[in-house]
Every structure is written in C-alpha cells, then in structure tokens.
Image (tube, rainbow, N blue to C red):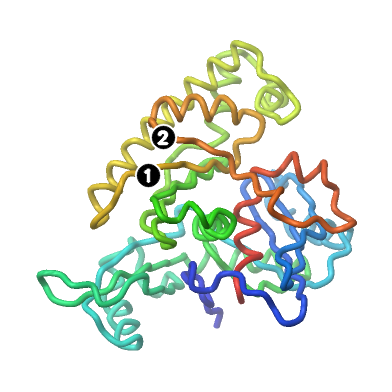
Amino acid sequence: MLQLKSLACFFSKRFSAPAVPSICLACDFGKSDILFLEAEKSSSGLKLLKFQRLARPEEKGKEAKILKETFEAGGYSSRKVRISVKGQGVIVRFVQFPQMKLEELRSAISFEIDQYIPFKEPEVLWDFQILEENLQSGDGVSMNVLLVAVKRDEIYTTLKIFQEAGLEVELIDVDALAAMNALAFFYPDRLQWPIAILDIGTEISSLSVAHHGRPRFIHDISFGGFDILKRLKRKLGLSQEQALKQISVEGVPMPEASAILRESLTDLATDLKVSLNYYLDQVPSAEPVKQLFMGNVAGYYPIVRETLGESLGIEIEAFDVLGKIQMGPEMDVELIKKARDLLAVSLGLLIREA
C-alpha cells in the first residue's frame, strides 16, 4: 500500500549536505505547465543540472505519453522522481492535541480525523508532523500538529500517469509545503518574522504563512491565471493566444490589458485580506505578515507587486533565487530565467530529504 512517506514533514527534513553528491529529479505537475528540474546535492549546495518546461496536454489521457517523451528527450540520470499535489482533494489542518507520545497521537488522529477533514478516513491517505510540543495553556500541556490528508483516488490517478510514463515516484509532498520549504531554505534571514508565499495557480491560488521556521497557516483561494485570461478575452475580445501574450514574460501589456490586470488583482487582494485576517483570528499568538513572496506571476509581476502592495500594505517580492544556486554546464540559463518565478515547488521538492 502506498504511504505518503513524510508528506507533512516540513522543516524537519530540510536539505542536509550528503557525504557523497546525489542527483534528484523533481516534477511540478501543474494544471497548465509541467516542469522537470534535476539537481545535484552536495556539500557545496544545490547545483541545477537540467530543466524542461512544457504545456500540459488539454486532452485527457495524453499526460503519460508527453511525460515519457519529455523525460527520454531530457536524458535524466534517474527514473526516480519527486512530485507534489494540490487542489480540493488536498486538506491541510493545524490541530492542537494534549501532549502525548507519538504512537498515541497517531491513534488519536486516526480516531478523530473525521472531525478535521470533509472526507471519511478510508477515502484518504494522511500524515502528520508535530510542530510544537510542551505548550502550556489553561487546559494543561498541549502540542500543535500539522495534519495533511489527500484523497486516495487523486493520488492513485497521478501515480498511474507517472507509472505509465516509466517513472518511479519516490516522494510525494504538498505544493504549499514544498514552496514554503524552499522559501525558508533560500531566505533564512526572513524567518524571524511572519512571511507568506502566494502561489497563483491556473485555477486555485494558495496562500501560506510561516513564522519562526514553521508553517502557521495555509489557505486556498478560488483565483487563478484562468480568471485573468477570461477577463482579458471577454473585455477586450482577445483570443486565448492574444490574451496569453498580455501576461507573458516577453510581452508588454497594452494599457487596456494593464487596467484589467489591476482590476483582477484588486479582487485577489480583497480575498487575501480576508484570508490574512482569518489567520490572525485563528492562529494563537499570530502576528501580521511582514512580507509576501510571489510565485507564478510571470511577466505581469510589476503590476502584481504594485497592486497587491498598495492594497495589502505589505512588501511584495518575487520568488527568484537563481542568484543563490549554482548552474551546471548543460543548463539553459536563458530558459530557466524566464521560468524563475515558477521554481518554488520544484526546488522545495529537491531540498527535501526522502
């Protein structure tokens, strides 16, 4: 039976320098884009070796074929791959339990899990990670626990695609946790205050907050790149291709498109305010977020930074760590520069210890 091995292990299994250099492969299997990123981990850090970005096929059932073709064309070193999951079938909860031993906690979660997730236990695979222990409160000594559950059918559907492509999945994580892991690894100087990362997906965006090196809050928002594209197409009469050019890295949005982007992002800012206020209300001893890192913002980052920064009143920064990573001789530097803001999940997967 598949186990989500260390699925919820966040900062506890971060990068450690191996005695012998090792090569890892990560695949960010998104709704619209698929990224392959291979890196060498050694005592000198992380060196990127190979990178490929491709569009996910619109026709169902073609994913395995394109994964296999891309993998074989890329000449990767191993068929073992690390992946992550996101979406409505993924549930992340922060739960408080009385202080107890590890096995007792596992039994308690198994017995009470229906209270925390909208699915029955047989429908999901789940894992947990203790975030804090020996917390004193009026009810005695307690612990904060991160609980992650993923619907079995979603996991098995994804695994089947990779198996049919001839790849072996060695590690499964959650997009939000992988991205936060990368953020903490590459920006350790920011951990003393609450920091957030916003991953703008195709249909769903994820807002995650970490403080003192630990996740505190994760929330999905019904907003994505499709919403921006639909608004551009509807209001300006653009085709899909024309709308994509307005938010591409190479293109410069025309004034009318910039106005619509701002309009969409203002709507997003409203949802973010609600989520950040909910974080302050729900998380004990929560402090306001000081800085928000952006993922998946492509060519419209300046507009995102300005619009969200003004609306939220916090510093907005792109997740761009290429200056912090070594590049292998086969790396297409220009190609990865264009995708630099898309790498948070892949890098988080590579940093993790299996």
Q: What's the CA distance linking mark 2 and mark 1?
A: 8 Å
Above or below residue 255? Residue 207 is below
SS at badge 2: loop
x and y, in percent, of residue 157 in the image: 60, 64
Mark 2: give few (<14), some (14-19) or many (20+) Cα within 10 Å.
Answer: some
Judging by the rendered image, the residue that carries numbered circle 2 is 314
Judging by the rendered image, the residue that carries numbered circle 1 is 289
x and y, in percent, of residue 279 in the image: 30, 48
Q: How many marks?
A: 2
Mark 1: give few (<14), some (14-19) or many (20+) Cα within 10 Å.
Answer: some
Q: Amino acid at mark 2?
A: Ile
Q: Tags 2 and 1 in contact by the CB under 8 Å rule?
A: yes
Which circle's residue, 2 or 1, is located before the other in the chain? 1
Above or below residue 105? Residue 163 is above
Above or below residue 168? Residue 235 is above
x and y, in percent, of residue 248 in the image: 70, 29
